[in-house]
Amino acid sequence: MLAEATKANWWKRESGGREVLALALPLMISSGFLSLMLFIDRMFLFWHSPPELAAAMPAGMCYWTLLCFPLGLVSYVNTFVAQYHGVAQPQRIGTAVSQGIWLGISSLPLFLCLIPLAPMLFRFFEHPEEVLKFEIVYFQFLMLGAGAGVISAAQATYYTGRGITRVEMYISVASTCLNALLDYVLIFGAGGFPELGIAGAAIATAIAQWIKVIAYFFLLRRPAVRNKFFLPTSRRLDFTLMRRIVRYGGPSGLQFFVESLAFTWVIFEMGQNGVIAMAATTLAFNINSVAFIPMNGISIAVSILVGQKLTASRVDLAARATWTALVIGLLYTGIFAAAYLAIPDWFLWGHARGADPETFSAVRDVAVVLLRFVAVYCIFDSMQLVFVGAIKGAGDTWFVLRTTVWISTIGLLIGTLGERQFAGGLYWWWSLIAAWIFLLGVIYLGRFQQGKWREMRVIETEFNPKT
C-alpha cells in the first residue's frame, strides 16, 4: 500500500510526473518528429547515393554549428518568458519575445554571407572529392533557411516559455511532414520535379523552416495575443532588455556553439577514415537522434519549470521537477540503449531497403559496433541534458559555458593526440565521445547538487521576488 501511494504521489503531486510530462511530451513529440525527419532525410540520401549520406553529416554539422550561437541566444528568451510568467508580467513577455525576433532577423545577412565561403571551408579538411562536392552543395542550400530557423525559435518562446507547448508541437509536426514529403519529391525527382539529390534535401529543409516563420507570424497577430501581451507596442527595440537577454543568453548560445564546433571537428576527423567509416558514423548518429533529440524537449521543459517555480518562490518545486524529469529521461533513453544492444538491425532495416546490398553490408558491420558506444553514452546524455536545463533555467549560463570550453578543449587535444601519435582511428574517437558525455553528466549533476542555481534569476530586480 505504501509503495502504491508513493507512486501515485510521484505522478499526481505538483512538479510530479504528470505535470512534467504534460509540459515535456509535446516538446518531445516535436523534437521526435525532427529526429524522424533527419532519419528519413538521411535514409533517402543513402538510397540515392552513399557519398551523399557521407557528406550530409559533416556539412549538416557545420550548418548546425554556425546556427548554434544565434539559436541558443534567442531560445534563451524562453527563460525570460517563463520568469516573467511566474511573476505575472504579461507586458514584459511581449517585449522579450519581440527582442528575440529582432535578434533572429539580424542573423539573416550573416548566414547569407557564408554561402560563397563554403568551398574554401570544406576543402580545408581534405575529404574525398566524391564527398566534398556534396558537402558544399548541401551546406549552401541549407544556409538559405538558417535565418528562418532562428526567427521561428524566437517566435516559439511566446508559447513554450509560458508552458503552452502544444502549439510548438503542432507547427513542428506539420513542417516536418512537409519537409519529409519535399525530401522525397526533390531528392528522387518524383511527380515531375527534377532529381536534385542532396541539394533537394537541403532545399526541402529551407522551405520547411520558412513555413514555420509564416505560421507563427499569423498566430502572433491574433487580437487576443496582441492585446493581452502588448505585442503592438512591444515591437520596438528595448536596448535595456536586449542587453539583459544577451548577458544571459549569450553564454547559452556560445555554449551551444563551442559544443557543436568541437563535435563537428570530431566528425571531420572521423571523415578522414574513409567513406564507409563516415557513412557508418552518420547512420549511428542518425539512429541515436531518435533517442537524443526528444531529450532536448525534456531539457527545455525543465528549464521552463525551473524558471517559473523560482520566480514563484518555490525552489523546492523547481528541484522536484528536475528530479522527476531525470526519471522520465532515464526511462526513455534506457529503452533505446537496450534496443541498440539487442536489436541493432531493426534500426538499420529502413536504410537497407533501398541500398545496394554489398555497400550496405560493409556499412552495417561498422554501424552495429558504433551503436554499442551509443548505448553506453546515451544514458549520461539524458542526465547532462536534464541538469543543464535546470541550471540554465535559473540563469547559471556562465558555468555551463566555462565547462563546455574546458571539456571540449581537453577532449579535442586528447583525441587529436591519439589520432596523430597512435593512429587511433574511428573507434578511438567514439570512445572519446562516450567518455566526454559521461564527464559532462557527472559535472552538471555536481553543479545542480551544489545549489547555487537556487538563488539565481534573470529578470529585473523590480519583478524579482527574491531580490
Image (spheres, helix red, strand yellow):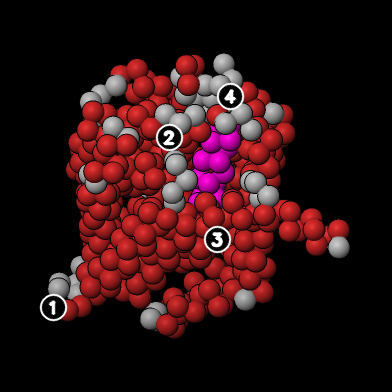
Tell me the residue that label 1 is attached to: 192
Q: Residue at x 64, y 27 (%)?
A: 454
Upstream in the sequence, badge 2 or badge 3?
2
Label disc, if present, on residue 81 of the rendered structure: 2
Q: Can you give x and y, in whole percent of width and height, for residue 215 in the image?
A: 25, 53
Quote the CA–CA distance across marks 2 and 1: 46 Å
Q: Which label lies toward us, 2 or 3?
A: 2
Q: Residue at x 80, y 58 (%)?
A: 5
Check the picture and name the quadrant holding the N terminus: bottom right
Is disc 4 placed on a helix, strand or loop? loop
Is disc 2 placed on a helix, strand or loop? helix
Quote the CA–CA distance across marks 4 and 1: 57 Å
Q: Can you give x and y, in whole percent of width and height, for residue 105 in the image?
A: 23, 36
Q: Can you give x and y, in whole percent of width and height, for residue 27 in the image?
A: 47, 54
Tell me the residue that label 4 is attached to: 456
Upstream in the sequence, badge 2 or badge 1?
2
Q: Does 309 appear in magenta?
A: yes
Is disc 3 placed on a helix, strand or loop? helix
